[in-house]
Amino acid sequence: MGYSKLLPVSILILIFAALAGVLFFNSQSFQSVEFGLAELSPKGPEGGYAMPASGGSTPSLYYNCSDSGEEVTLYWTPSFDVQGHDHGTITYNLRIDNLVDGWRNASCSGQSSNDVCVNGLTSTSWTGSVIPGQTYEAWIHGCSGGTTVSGGGCSSGATNIQFTCNAGEDSIPTVNLEVKNTTTDSDWTGEDITINPGEEVALRWDSNNTASCEGQNFSTGNLTDGTQSNVTEPASGTNELYLVACISSVNATISVYDWLYVTVLGEGPEIETDPPIVDPGDEVEIIWDTGDVDPGECTIAGPGLNISLTENTGSEIVTVYNESTYVIDCGVNGNDEVTVEVLPVIQET
């Protein structure tokens, strides 16, 4: 009877041990269960996400840009690490590489000032400054038992995600350049203008969201807006480009430009005669000078003379019998004329 009472106790012990093993195994299996991608949506004008590369230990990553494009927030899903530690012990190592200068060192030493290398984050988001228009690459490590990947307690990085935060409309740099003929007191205009020799001009510029501006063929003093009346005008018969370049106040790699041309008319053509007064039937020398004008643009016409010019200066001999007018015509570049006076014939009685 005593033996029969011991048998059920032994069986109970074996059953208890078996159940304990099953419970222990299930407990370990539960701790390594992967957290899936949380159903989160972008929270701003620009956003994106990256799924984990492999393994339940790797967080999923996505981003969101601010309206101005000067700030980004990175979010990642919580996960257990490869060692099966409790979720509450997890920290995260964040890496953000500005692709302009590349990533240098996994241990966060010697990184560019444009890069981010942060260890031991306990939250599942991070917000920081970025340069609008530049492209970044980010990845995140879930860690436990170490603060660096080489420490053995961190997961491999999530699938790298690239992002570019573009400047909002209120942050876009702009600049306008205008010119005015101060001699004639003309209106300000952003168009090219033409002036006469000896006339003077002034320039003015106005910009938004810029840090400084520089001028070509005139000085801005690095000011972002202003007026400059001390301008060197082009030489007679030539034109000059005036340009202003301004650097964005939110992204030093971005510049904006505006420009215009000022043209100064050349010295116009001139024509004269020698002598200016003659008797009927006398010869007269017609003398011309096209000034800064291409002689191929000019003709001379009058009694006994109708020629196209090939030289800037020259003369022709003509015989005149009556008062005669000779015109040098250079089209849009100007014209001039001269009249030969003929003395009257005095009849003796």
Image (cartoon, rainbow, N blue to C red):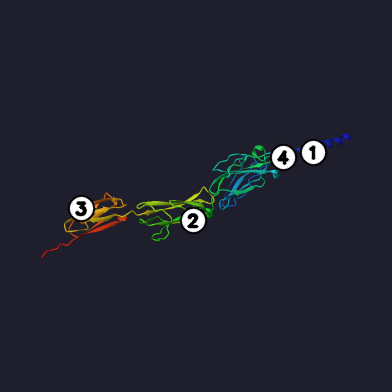
Q: Amino acid at mark 1?
A: Phe
For the N terminus, which image quadrant?
top right
Where 232 sits versus 3, above or below? below
Crowding near pointer 3: few (<14 within 10 Å), some, many (20+)?
some
Pointer 2 residue: 225
Viewer-side residue, 24 vs 52:
52
In the image, which is nearer the foreground, mark 2 or mark 3?
3
Name the N-terminal-most of marks 4 and 3: 4
Pointer 4 residue: 28
Viewer-side residue, 193 vs 155:
193
**Rendered image: mark on residue 16:** 1
Q: Amino acid at mark 4?
A: Gln
Name the N-terminal-most of marks 2 and 3: 2
Label 4 vs label 2: CA separation? 69 Å
Where 214 sits versus 12, above or below? below
Label 2 vs label 3: CA separation? 59 Å
Pointer 3 residue: 317
Q: Position of residue 224 (x, y in %)?
A: 50, 54
